[in-house]
Image (tube, rainbow, N blue to C red):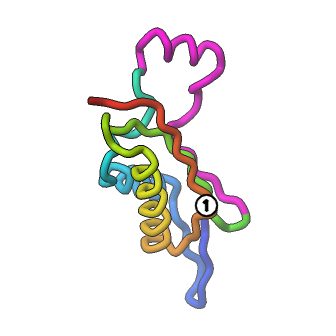
Amino acid sequence: MPELENHLGTIGISDEYLYSLVKYTVSTCYGVAGIGRAGKGNVVSFIMEKAGFGKGKTINIDIHGGKLTIEIHISVIFGVNVSAVTDSLVHKLRYTIKDKTGMDVSRVTVYIDGMTG
């Protein structure tokens, strides 16, 4: 659990709150079709998972040196500019987390795992 200290004392922020904040922020971002790996259940994803790729969570949040690092897997809407969507998502995540928690985000890594029509 991340903790922040100020002149009033220590503030603890639960992991669940951070995950739900990230999920909500991503769900309100233009061009994002969903969080997670697209195509679960198809042959390609089965082979990739058996080969050791695609394992793990769809959202990973770590703390290094008092700053957050976020890795997120999303699918985008077909036809959108992927670069614009990811830039907007990174900016929105950094702003929202700083605004709601006071914590800095050092790095946001976005993986595009698919697209939906």
Give the answer, above or below, for where 100 lies relative to 29.
below
Across and down, in percent, residue 40 comes to 42, 20
**Residue at x 26%, y 29% (from the top left corner):** 117
Residue 59 painted magenta: yes
Q: Residue furthest left?
A: 117
Residue at screen point 33% across, 43% down: 80
| Vertical side of 3 occupied by 56: above or below | above
Where is residue 60? Give x, y as percent: 57, 45
Q: Is residue 74 left or right of residue 1?
A: left
Residue denoted by label 1: 68
* Residue situated in front as seen by the camera: 24 or 13: 24
> In the image, is residue 85 above or below residue 66?
above
Q: Is residue 84 left or right of residue 61?
A: left
Quadrant in the picture for residue 103 = bottom right
Which secondary structure, mark 1?
A: strand
For label 1, count other residues whose C-alpha is less than 10 Å away and answer few (under 14), some (14-19) or many (20+): some
